[in-house]
Image: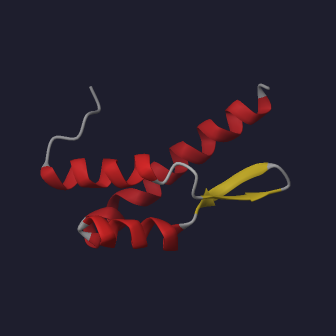
Amino acid sequence: MNAPRTVEGIGVWDVIVKCAGQVRTTGGAVTGLDFAAVFRLADALGVDPFVLAECLPAVEAVIVSKLNEQIANR
């Protein structure tokens, strides 16, 4: 359904999955991803930083929302 359809999309997805623990928190809530860490990993994996930069804000919003939802439901 939402599976990546391009080589670039697969690369971005790989980076996102591998950066699952690279989150910023404040007061027990997730506030965002550590973009510096995400882009360093992308560089190491050879993922196009432009494509990642285009996708990351939207992906970050979903990750933050879902993680905070999980925290609230504990």
* Residue found at x 69% / y 31%: 70
Q: In which quarter of the image is the N terminus?
A: top left
Q: Quadrant of the C terminus?
A: top right
Instruction: Estimate the x, y position of residue 41 in percent, counting from the top left.
Output: 39, 66
Q: Quadrant of residue 3?
A: top left
Residue found at the far left of this picture: 6
Please state if 60 lies on the left or on the right of 66 as rendered: left
* Residue found at x 32% / y 70%: 44
Q: Quick check: 18 above or below 37?
A: above
Residue found at the far right of this picture: 27
Q: Nearer the viewer, residue 61 or 13?
A: 13
Instruction: Estimate the x, y position of residue 60 in percent, counting from the top left.
Output: 51, 53
Instruction: Estimate the x, y position of residue 72 in percent, counting from the top left.
Output: 78, 32
Instruction: Estimate the x, y position of residue 33 in percent, counting from the top left.
Output: 57, 60
* Residue found at x 35% / y 57%: 55
* Residue found at x 82% / y 49%: 28
Q: In which quarter of the image is residue 71?
A: top right
Please state if 29 lies on the left or on the right of 61 as rendered: right
Please state if 20 lies on the left or on the right of 68 as rendered: left
Q: In which quarter of the image is residue 27?
A: bottom right
Q: Quick check: 65 above or below 37?
A: above
Q: Which of 17 and 60 is in front in this view?
A: 17
Residue found at the far front of this picture: 44
